[in-house]
Image: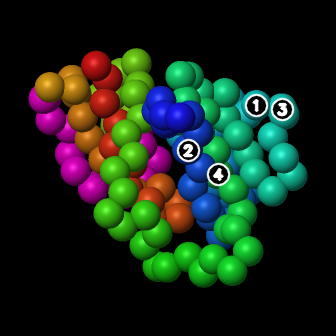
Amino acid sequence: MTVTGIDFVALQVRDLDQAAAFYEKHLGLKRDPGAPPHAVVFATEPIAFAVREPLPGVELPERPGAGVALWLKADDAQRLHDDLQTAGVPIVTPPIDGPFGRTFSFEGPEGYVITIHDR
């Protein structure tokens, strides 16, 4: 038996509606209608991405996800950066050009730092 790779990524969030609205509004993600009631699953490819209520017994720290690197691919990282900056979303790392194309990081509504790249 062998693990073949990542198949699903979910962030646990305090405010499910607020987090889902952020990813829809600012990243253009579309909801997958088959999500369970405690989560919002987005129709992302090749790996599904979701936000969900915390699992039982989980107390989220002030900055959840410390030590985890979550990268999402976009068609145009610079344009997304500019849109997020205009909307007042905290930019953690400004855009740079590197091996993954144009790359930057922002802080989402729950404190998760997410990196965007376009290659």
* Numbered range of the magenta stretch: 83-98
Which amino acid, mark 2?
Val
Give the residue pinned by disc 3.
Answer: 33
Residue 60 locus on image (x, y percent):
56, 76
Within-10-Å neighbours for mark 3: few <14, some 14–19, many 20+: few
Q: Nearer the viewer, mark 3 or mark 2?
A: 2
Q: Residue at x 84, y 34 (%)?
A: 34
How far apart are the two marked residues, 2 and 4, measured between alpha carbons? 9 Å
Structural distance between the alpha carbons of marks 3 and 1: 4 Å
Residue type highlighted by circle 3: Pro
Which residue position is annotated with label 2?
A: 9
Q: Are marks 4 and 3 in contact (CB under 8 Å)?
A: no
Among numbered discs 1 and 2, the one appearing first in the sequence: 2
Find numbered disc 1 in the image and state the secondary structure of the residue it sits on.
Answer: loop
Which residue is more in the foreground, 14 or 88?
Answer: 14
Query: For residue 11, what is the image quadrant?
Result: bottom right
Q: Residue 51, which numbered label? A: 4
| Residue 112 place in picture, x, y as percent | 44, 60
Mark 1–mark 2 CB contact (< 8 Å):
no
